[in-house]
Image (tube, grey):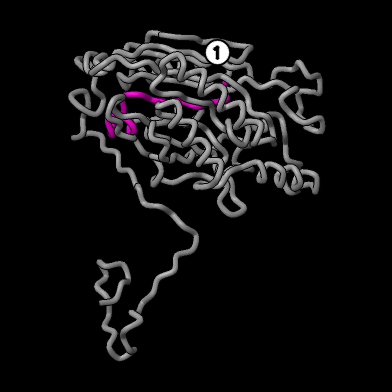
Amino acid sequence: MAKQRVAVVQSGSRMFDTAATLARMEQLTDAAAVQGARLIVFPEAYVGGYPKGLDFGARVGSRSLAGRDDYLRYWRAAIDVPGPEVTRMGEMARRALAWLVVGVIEREGATLYCTALFFGPDGTLRGRHRKLMPTASERLIWAMGDGSTVPVVDTSELGKIGAAICWENYMPALRMAMFGQGIGIWCAPTVDDRDIWQCTMRHIAYEGRCFVLSACQYLTRADCPEDYDCIQGNAPETTLIRGGSVIVDPFGQVLAGPVYDGEAVLTAELDLDDIVRGKFDLDVTGHYSRPDVFELSVDTRARRAVSFRCDTLESESPEEVVPADPQEKGVSR
């Protein structure tokens, strides 16, 4: 396989200003494309924002009116998939002639999801992953995804790419599900800026014998509105998320980064043959597995709170309807 240049973008959202965030994203995508990147990864919740330090007025047993207004403002900054913002991001990918992976806050009805979107170099939306398990207080504002959006996208020039968002990377079963789909480039959009995150990224690269591209936000208090009531304080220079973006090869070696305390576009050239070289002695879903002892079952069905099924065909009168085959899930014949 040919060598390919990739990029991770370290930048912060313009909180509650999705239009401004998209404008900056366009500039950064173009900057990565100029450097020859064929895959460009943006951080978790980049479009829509990560509300670091907000509590949304929630205490055990009570929610405040001000907190409800905070959620309304956050919901308004989120995006529909599909929608006009998705179309615009597709145009960014098309102009860059690159694959684009970006963290967004996705709106469905009144519910929000932390999502990663995959765009092809032709500008089309190729995949969507909803974060399976929001962490701690994130569960107050984000719903959980299901197994229907855990894709590994097969590209022609880059092999198979997928994404795990922030602390999903600590879920062993999810990692195995990704490894089992043959992932070669593991995208890790995040807002985790702790030093130990670097250990996690190197471990996943070495465990899965895959490349890991982690894009973390760099967010300051100045990127937020004046009435952004976060626990860290109101000084504009206060750093809310310090970055730590990094690119790692299948042997756990760092190719670029980590970089902290500033906006950055990191690039590296990947020798995709290193994926196979690495699996010579460790393929955790191949020769280094024990399916006779351990087995993982993944439910990829979409889960809905309400399902509507029609038990009759419009062309049939009631007396013509016969009981459906149970295996046909309620569809009459």
Can the viewer see residue 189 in this picture? yes
Residue at 70%, 20% in the rendered image:
220
Q: Is residue 185 magenta?
A: yes
Residue at 73%, 28% in the rendered image:
224
Of residue 175 and residue 295, the one placed in the foreground of this image is 175
Q: How many marks?
A: 1
**On the rendered structure, is 286 left or right of 166?**
left
Q: Is residue 263 magenta?
A: no
Of residue 48 and residue 88, the one placed in the foreground of this image is 88
Q: Position of residue 104 (x, y in %)?
A: 55, 36
Classify mark 1: residues with Cα within 10 Å, few (<14), some (14-19) or many (20+): few
Q: Position of residue 263 (x, y in %)?
A: 60, 15
Q: Position of residue 282 (x, y in %)?
A: 24, 18
Q: Up-down: is 180 above or below 30?
A: below
Can the viewer see residue 170 in this picture? no
Region of the chain picked out in magenta, as a range? 176-192
Outermost residue, bottom side? 319
Element assignment for label 1:
loop
Residue behind mark 1? 195
Q: Up-down: is 315 above or below 147?
A: below
